[in-house]
């Protein structure tokens, strides 16, 4: 895949999971450069579809929200609201802490925590993490806008009879689907990806772009969506979708 937007070969070490951003059992990291590239490609579609300058972003399988947080930090000037949900309530505490770091107060709290750890243990890794956090702070201050964040528990592939808490109509959905290495589907639905796409029809705006990242061997299709683009990156594929022009479902 050719990178069209994130064409600087940076190490992105400031965004590494476990450095400033938190990680834990049941959470995964996502390649930061790829996350930003996917978001910016999605934005290119939205620019042609609506007049908004800042968008609402949702990940229905967010885990620890590493993907969402990286996007918020790198591309926050284009983001107004970030929401993440997961079936596993335990990982949402990590997600909330990570998403808080897309704003000044959250990164200030993390810097204070890291300074306390460095004072107590004098480890070089803590000192390096403080430097990373301060660089992330500079990015947030340069942005001069606040991002609203939200985390909630939901089964993305569950029955629509149990509606998701959010009342938002999202401009963009980006999610890294579970594919069995570190994280597996916990849904009882025999075709969770199909159910996820069906459920997303309830929470996306008419102009929305839905981006699913999955194992490149996985076949993804749904009769209510048109495919816009498919990228292959190593073992992954990223598929961009738009909903068909039809009446939207309501709860």
Image (cartoon, rainbow, N blue to C red):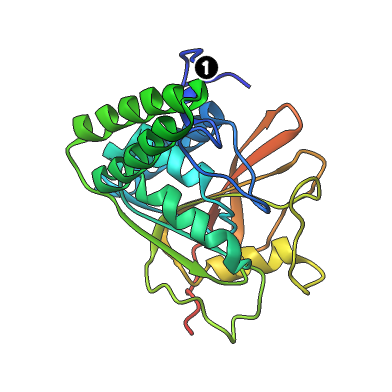
Is residue 14 rendered to the left or right of residue 17?
left
Residue 174: x %, y % from top left: 53, 49
Badge count: 1
Pick the quarter of the image with the N terminus: top right
Name the residue at 74% across, 52% down.
Answer: 183
Give the vertical position of 188 relative to 170 (above or below).
below
- On the image, which quarter does residue 225 sit in? bottom right
Is residue 231 rendered to the left or right of residue 51?
right
User: Looking at the image, can residue 53 be seen?
Assistant: no
Give whichever of 107, 213 is nearer the camera: 107
Give the vertical position of 223 relative to 144 (above or below).
below
For mark 1, does the 10 Å Cα neighbourhood hold few (<14), some (14 to 19), or many (20 or more) residues? few
Residue 165: x %, y % from top left: 45, 77
Tag 1, which secondary structure? loop
Is residue 140 rendered to the left or right of residue 110?
left
Name the residue at 44% across, 43% down.
Answer: 69
- On the image, which quarter does residue 61 sit in? bottom right
- On the image, which quarter does residue 181 sit in? top right
Give whichever of 89, 167 is nearer the camera: 89
User: Looking at the image, can residue 77 be seen?
Assistant: yes
Residue carrying label 1: 11
Give the vertical position of 99 relative to 234 (above or below).
below
Residue 205: x %, y % from top left: 40, 62
Farthest residue to the front: give it: 120
Farthest residue to the top: give it: 9
Name the residue at 69% across, 37% down.
Answer: 237
Farthest residue to the left: give it: 144
Name the residue at 22% across, 48% down.
Answer: 146
Give the vertical position of 37 relative to 149 (above or below).
above
Give whichever of 17, 59 is nearer the camera: 17
Residue 120: x %, y % from top left: 44, 35
């Amino acid at each position: 895949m050719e990178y069209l937007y994130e064409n600087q070969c940076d190490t992105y070490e400031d965004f590494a999971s476990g450095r400033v951003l938190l990680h834990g059992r049941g959470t995964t990291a996502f390649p930061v450069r790829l996350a930003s590239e996917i978001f910016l490609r999605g934005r290119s579609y939205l620019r042609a579809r609506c007049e908004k300058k800042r968008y609402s972003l949702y990940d229905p399988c967010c885990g620890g929200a590493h993907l969402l947080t990286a996007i918020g930090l790198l591309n926050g000037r284009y983001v107004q609201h970030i929401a993440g949900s997961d079936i596993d309530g335990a990982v949402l505490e990590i997600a909330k802490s990570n998403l808080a770091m897309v704003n000044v107060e959250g990164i200030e709290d993390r810097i204070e925590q890291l300074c306390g750890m460095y004072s107590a243990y004098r480890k070089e890794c803590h000192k390096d993490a403080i430097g990373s956090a301060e660089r992330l702070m500079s990015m947030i201050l340069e942005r001069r806008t606040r991002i609203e964040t939200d985390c909630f528990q939901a089964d993305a592939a569950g029955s629509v009879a149990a509606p998701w808490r959010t009342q938002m109509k999202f401009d963009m959905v980006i999610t890294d689907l579970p594919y069995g290495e570190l994280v597996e589907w916990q849904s009882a639905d025999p075709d969770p990806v199909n159910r996820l796409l069906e459920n997303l029809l309830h929470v996306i705006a008419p102009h929305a772009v839905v981006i699913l990242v999955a194992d490149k061997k996985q076949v993804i299709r749904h009769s209510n969506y048109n495919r816009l683009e498919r990228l292959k990156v190593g073992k992954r594929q990223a598929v961009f979708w738009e909903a068909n022009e039809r009446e939207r479902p309501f709860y």
